[in-house]
Image (cartoon, helix red, strand yellow):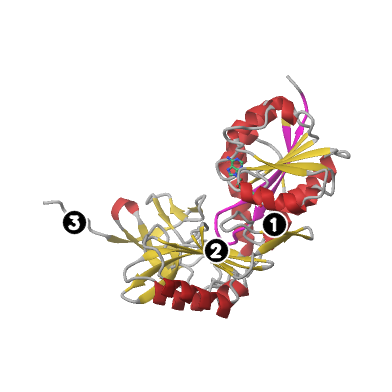
Amino acid sequence: MKKKFEKEIKTITIDKLGSEGEGYSIQDDLAVFYTLPGETVSVEVGYQKRTFLKEILIPSKNRIEPYCPFFGHCGGCSLQHVSRETYHQFKKENLQKLLQNADITTHLHDLISVEKGQRRRVSFSYKNLNGVIRFGFLKRQSKFLTDIDSCPLLTARLNSLIQPTKELLEKITPEKSTGFVMVTETQYGIDFSFSPHHKPKFTPEQIQLFAEFSRENGVSRITRAGKELLIENDVPSVEFDGQKVDFPAGAFLQPSIQGETLLKESMLRFIEKYAKKPKLIFDLFCGLGTFTLPLSKIAKTIGYDITGESIQNLAKVLPLPSKVEARNLFTNPLDEHELKSADVVVLDPPRAGARDQMEHLKRAKTPLIVYISCHAGTFLRDAKDLIEAGYELKELQPVDQFPDTAHIELVSAFVFIKGN
Ligand SMILES: C[S@@+](CC[C@H](N)C(=O)[O-])C[C@H]1O[C@@H](n2cnc3c(N)ncnc32)[C@H](O)[C@@H]1O
């Protein structure tokens, strides 16, 4: 018979923070979330060294009181317990280590952060447990849900929708069912996407409940998983640089206006500094035009993205001679001849980075490339490619889009220095 694994309670000392913000004990080779270097803690050690913090026995002087009552139970945040000075230092040192390992030198700016209460886009998980709805975020490394009634990172408007959404789910979901709800607060309306894991079609009675929910809570549109339209009272739209763009259900949107502004301002600063009167700019992976619209005020800008609907909506408001084109930049990247005429290329790819596009960018020798990234690993891979091809990474601006997590976003300026 298989022997049952026995959990063990241990007292350990934390030596350093790991890359995900977890405390790490060198002597015991254990990683424990929500701890800090210098602390002595009591932990439960489970199968495959999974740890669960039981008690802080000797706290660090860098420990602060978390602002959220769900911190430590909810898997969303990992660093609310860290003094702001240590937090900023942790993120900067993390990045310095990654750059060092990749053998890249640059001017690394201090972190600029989004504040609490700014997040306008969120995906909640839910479970109907014998008629009672659990609604919130998954616990860390677990399939269990932390039921929340508010989240300090979200906008007040998104928080105001939590309780009514729970009540709706109580009425329309079968017992034991699970799924996701994604809510986006645009400047003009709420987009609500409901993704149950169970498949049956909604009944007319359920659609009626969706309609009532949308009216009572000022929700503009409800879809099933961003695809099947269930309710549309009006079309939500976003505003970039004073231009209103219709928001397709499930489209990409930067998670906060503040984060979007920090990324945009850093990008514009680099263009102003390193590009002398550009005439043509390419905006690769342009989405709904977050950067295309402000760029079109500097020079003719051509935006490319795979999603046809976003591109069409952007095309309606983008001033001539700027334009957009639907294109899969992974399978059909812009080649060096197409890129040749651009003075600046801005690219903001998904987490996978832009490896195939990099090959052509390297050969095109575009004078300035501003690379915006949501994944440090793929960014460094692509950055090394550009540097080998004769580019210099002049500046790197880290942006803290998801406060109190280990996540980091980057805006970078690559200037072409020498050809081979
Ligand atoms: C990180 S988002 C950036 C969007 C936009 N720059 C913004 O800030 O709102 C990445 C974008 O890449 C697009 N995308 C994903 N895969 C793509 C592909 N293979 N070819 C072209 N665009 C793609 C997505 O549609 C999305 O709009």
> Residue furthest toward the left?
1
The magenta stretch is: 392-418
| Location of mark 2 (residue) | 122
Question: How many numbered callouts?
Answer: 3
> Residue furthest toward the front?
204
> How many angstroms separate mark 1 from mark 2 (CA)?
15 Å
Question: Badge 3: few (under 14), some or many (20 or more) residues near its Cα, within 10 Å?
Answer: few
Q: Quadrant of the C terminus?
A: top right
Determine if the magenta segment contains residue 29.
Answer: no
In the image: residue 4, left or right of residue 291: left
In the image: residue 343, left or right of residue 143: right
> What is the three-letter code of the residue carrying label 2?
Val
Residue under the point 81% across and 50% down: 319
> What is the three-letter code of the residue carrying label 3?
Lys
Question: Mark 1 against mark 3, which lies toward the viewer?
Answer: 1
Residue 191 showing in the rendered view = yes
**Residue 39 image offset from top left, x and y in percent:** 47, 62
Mark linked to residue 4: 3
> What is the three-letter code of the residue carrying label 1?
Glu
Question: Badge 2: few (under 14), some or many (20 or more) residues near its Cα, within 10 Å?
Answer: few
Mark found first going from the N terminus, 1 or 2: 2
| Location of mark 1 (residue) | 260
> How many angstroms separate mark 1 from mark 3 (CA)?
50 Å
Mark found first going from the N terminus, 1 or 3: 3
Nearer to the camera, 51 or 387: 387
Up-down: is 246 above or below 188?
A: above
